[in-house]
Amino acid sequence: MTALGYGAMVCVLILVGLPLYWIVVTSFKERPDIYVQPSVWWPHSFHPENYATATSTVPFWIFLRNSLIITSIISAVKFALGVFSAYGLVFLRFPGKNIVFLAIIAALMVPNQITVISNYALIAQLGWRNTFQGIIVPLCGVAFGTFLMRNHFLSLPAEVIEAARMDGARSWRLLTRVVLPMSGPTMVAFGIITVVNEWNEYLWPFLMTDDSSVAPLPVGLSILQNTENPSVTNWGPVMAGTVLAMLPILVVFLLLQRHMIKGLTSGAVKG
Amino acid sequence: MTYINRRGFLGLTGAVAAGAALTACAGSGSGGSSSGDSKTINFWSNHPGTSTDVEKELIKRFEAKFPDLKVNLIDGGKNYEEVSQKFNAALSGGDVPDVVVLSDVWWFNYALIGAIEPLDDHFAAAGVNTADYVDSLVSDYVFNGKHYALPYARSTPLFYYNKQVWSQAGLPDRGPSSWQEFDQWGPELQRVVGDGKLAHGWGNAKDYLAWTFEGPIWTFGGSYSDKWNLKFNDEKTIAAGNFLRDMIHTKKYAAVSNSIATDFGAGILASTIASTGDLSGITKNAKFDFGTAFLPAADGTPGCPTGGAGLAIPAKISDERKLNALKFIDFITNTENTAYFSQNVGYMPVRKSAVDDPSEKDYLAKNPRSKVAIDQLPRTRSQDYARVFVPGGDQIIGTGLEQIALQNADVTSTFANVSGQLQQIIDRQITPKLPK
């Protein structure tokens, strides 16, 4: 059984690791090492100039700044909305609670692409095209986060919640002092998923932006590519840009992972 | 410490939920006339062939000639599909561009719904002389007797071949004169290249297989369609499909490649049909001598489709903006500028007079491979409606050809299925909108 587990781990490592390795290695290759058969698994000579090309051919640092602004604001808003709305659905009594939850589930079922045209029309009428608010506001809908956090809150031990209420904890205190401290791992998971999704968001920012002033990295880096005639593309700088775009997310993940594990190992009720 | 009671918290949660609902479901709106600064031209481009710097130079030249006009170059995406997607969204509301790049498979959809302007009524005012545009290229944008775009980044497929392999196979240094001749060469070329490589590679559906195989179908006497009349059940079209199937599955000297231009440049394919737009990339990538040739076709038979993109003007902008936009289109596609664009990007010059431009003459003398595309123009023909005018037609046809090439699917039944899908779209989406 252990061998099977290790075997599966190795398979996953290869499936995930190989493309990542290829991206990193290609980011140091010169053009002749990229367009060659058989494939070159280790560059004949390292070409770090690709990173300079990636950051100078396009206004990379502006795109990075934009990505940080967009991702941090959307993630913060989504996180707050997700936690508050899930708390309301689990711990507060009000009429039509199940209908609200069903509406949220229904929203989850609607692909983003369906709402693009109506969102675009509204944002354009508000004069928000090519602005941060035009990109951010429509992406703040939070059905997934509400669903995830609600299901987690339902799994919390009822006796702990009851004890807190008997101690006189009101809604705000119950949320901040009892519910959230017991929800570390789920919140971190929710945070990571949200940050990664927003960081990689392409379609909506692409439709909303006209220039580098508000365009995030995924939109900006596409300028380095030419998918009409792929042979024209110099993949070295494209991969260098991809590596640079991955790094901030990797840092966030590594920082949050520690808290995730810590949250998983800490018990809410001591025996 | 201030406590929030249950009612207050419910209120807060309700406000948050309402906000979330509003942001998730923005209301729809339809755009009326699009207002904008008439002295500013917004040019939406996907920068065909990685032409950002070239486009910026063309804009600089335009602004020098028309100092009262300003041009904003706006990134429309990384390919023709994305720029069309962005334009489509813009039509739903808000400001549309003044000039937009639309490819061969996109402009007609917008012309049909009245989203782009017929340009003929503005030609005189803008001083446009369409007679100097290459006939086969400018006629590609005619619908119902009107021009809906003008040619810009135009290409044709070329036959690319590895001269080294050709020499080893004892073949003459030229492209095949017909597909039948190439069918004789194929097995010998395959023997020379050996396992793991191919004598010929076709692109997949995403790599425009429906475009690159259009010429071969014509040389067999078939076609995808004759105007709106689909021809997939025609025995000559089926014969061309069987030719594709046999070269891959019976004679085994060809296959579908994931990236034809890249694989040819890497030496995996001994020959392929790829766009003129790929020429600069292949030239940089290939470590061997290669040639370009006309697509195989008997003399006098058009065996090559045109392709690439043109420039269109949205219908809902003001007449003044339309006029300025047309001046811009005319300027960046004039003799000198189309020659400059062609030399730096790899697409074809779109003006007849460009071949007499001194810089173009010099360029073609130094780059005979590029000259092949221009020399081939008289042997081109406008594409079949089924591919370029039917929404999604390119991918439907390409997927059908892919099934034949990858799965050894029966040609007759596959083409019948393709025909059925296309006919349904024509009946539902096109016929009701066609002028009576």
Image (cartoon, coloured by chain):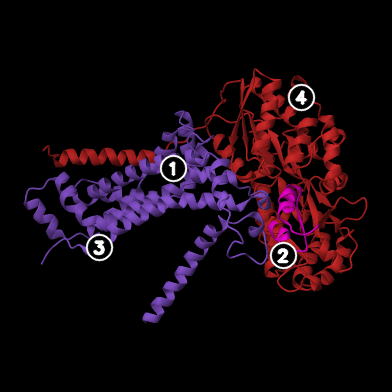
Q: Which mark is residue B293?
A: none
Quarter the C terminus of chain B occupies = top right
Q: Amino acid at mark 4?
A: Phe
Q: Tag count in the figure?
A: 4
Kindly indicate whether the residues beneath marks 3 and 2 are on one polypeptide chain. Answer: no
Q: Which chain is red?
A: B
Magenta segment boundaries in residue numbering: B262-289
Is residue B144 among what the camera can see?
A: no
Q: Decide which of A224, A73 is in the foreground and name it.
A: A224
Residue B292, how many percent across, how many down? 82, 53
Q: Would you name the residue on which mark 2 appears?
A: B268
Give how far apart the Cα atoms at labels 3 and 2 are: 51 Å
Q: Does mark 4 fall on the same chain as mark 2?
A: yes
- Give the SS element for disc 4: helix
Drawn side of residue B115 relative to residue B352, left or right: left
Q: Which mark is residue A264?
A: 3
Q: Which residue: 73% across, 60% down?
A: B264
| Residue type pointed to by label 1 | Ser
Q: Is residue A69 magenta?
A: no
Q: CA distance from mark 2 to mark 1?
A: 39 Å
Q: Residue at x 69, y 20 (%)?
A: B66
Residue found at the very far right of the displayed protein: B299
Residue A70, position in %: x, y? 41, 40
Q: Residues within 10 Å of mark 2 (few under 14, many from 20)?
A: many
Chain of the residue that carries numbered disc 4 in the rendered image: B
**Chain that appears purple:** A
Q: Is residue B386 left or right of residue A102?
A: right
Point out the tag, 2 or 4, that comes first from the N-terminus: 4
